[in-house]
Image: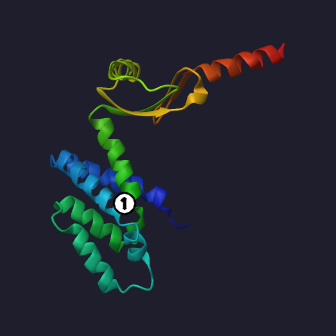
Amino acid sequence: MALTNAVVAPRYARALFEAAQDTDQLDNVHTELDALREILTQNAGLLPTLTAVTVSQENKQALVDTLKQGASSLVANLVQVSFEYGRIAALPAIIADFEQRYADSIGQLDATITTAVELNATQQQALSQAIAARFGAKQVQLTTTIDPSVLGGVMVQTRTAVIDGTVRTRLAKLRAQLLAK
């Protein structure tokens, strides 16, 4: 049975995370992976080129060598090993998994809040503090979305939980209760 990138990515990310932690390079590797993710995003044809059967191994290796330029040994080894083992297409998933491990290690929680209207800075700060207290996080990275259809209230989504305190949901629950009786 062939392993998918979704199965392999957490293994590579865990190994990289542990190596970075052991050598006290966690912040540096995090920064380098952010830059690598940006390169992969800006050059959408790069990963397909590195996995194409029509491109020679020498040309692919030249691209990989360019990606490794200026990188620490840990990140350069990740890129090289993932290429050699045919897992270069898993790099975005490896980076995402590493980022989640990094965020967990520093007590950062990523949360998306959905409201009917835009919140001011004071409201966002208060909400961020409430979310941090609720989930035991040291800091909260908020992403805000505006959706007038929620009517009011707030919906908070994290990687592991959804707290829906919107008026739309409350009305839907009330409607369901009235129809059930």
Query: Which residue is at a point 36% across and 43% down the rendered structure image?
Result: 100
In the image, is 170 to the left or to the right of 27?
A: right
In the image, is 148 to the left or to the right of 128?
A: right
Foreground residue among 163 and 43: 43
Image height of 159 relative to 153, above or below: below
Residue picked out by circle 1: 41
Query: Which residue is at a point 23% across and 60% down the rendered structure image?
Result: 75
Foreground residue among 62 and 106: 62
Model colouring = rainbow
In the image, is 102 to the left or to the right of 24?
A: right
Query: Which residue is at a point 44% across and 86% down the rendered structure image?
Result: 54
Element on which disc 1 rests = helix
Image height of 43 relative to 62, above or below: above
Q: Amino acid at mark 1?
A: Thr
**Neighbour class for label 1 at 10 Å: few (<14), some, many (≥20)?**
few
Residue 1 percent location from the top left of the image: 55, 67
Q: How many marks?
A: 1
Foreground residue among 17 and 123: 123
Image height of 104 relative to 171, above or below: below
Residue 117 percent location from the top left of the image: 49, 25
Residue 76 percent location from the top left of the image: 22, 65
Residue 120 percent location from the top left of the image: 37, 22
Image height of 126 relative to 91, above or below: above
Please tell me in which quadrant of the rendered image residue 179 appears.
Answer: top right
Please tell me in which quadrant of the rendered image residue 88 appears.
Answer: bottom left
Foreground residue among 39 and 64: 39
In this rendering, does residue 34 appear at all? yes
Picture quarter with the C terminus:
top right
In this rendering, does residue 87 appear at all? no
Query: Which residue is at a point 21% across and 59% down the rendered structure image?
Result: 74
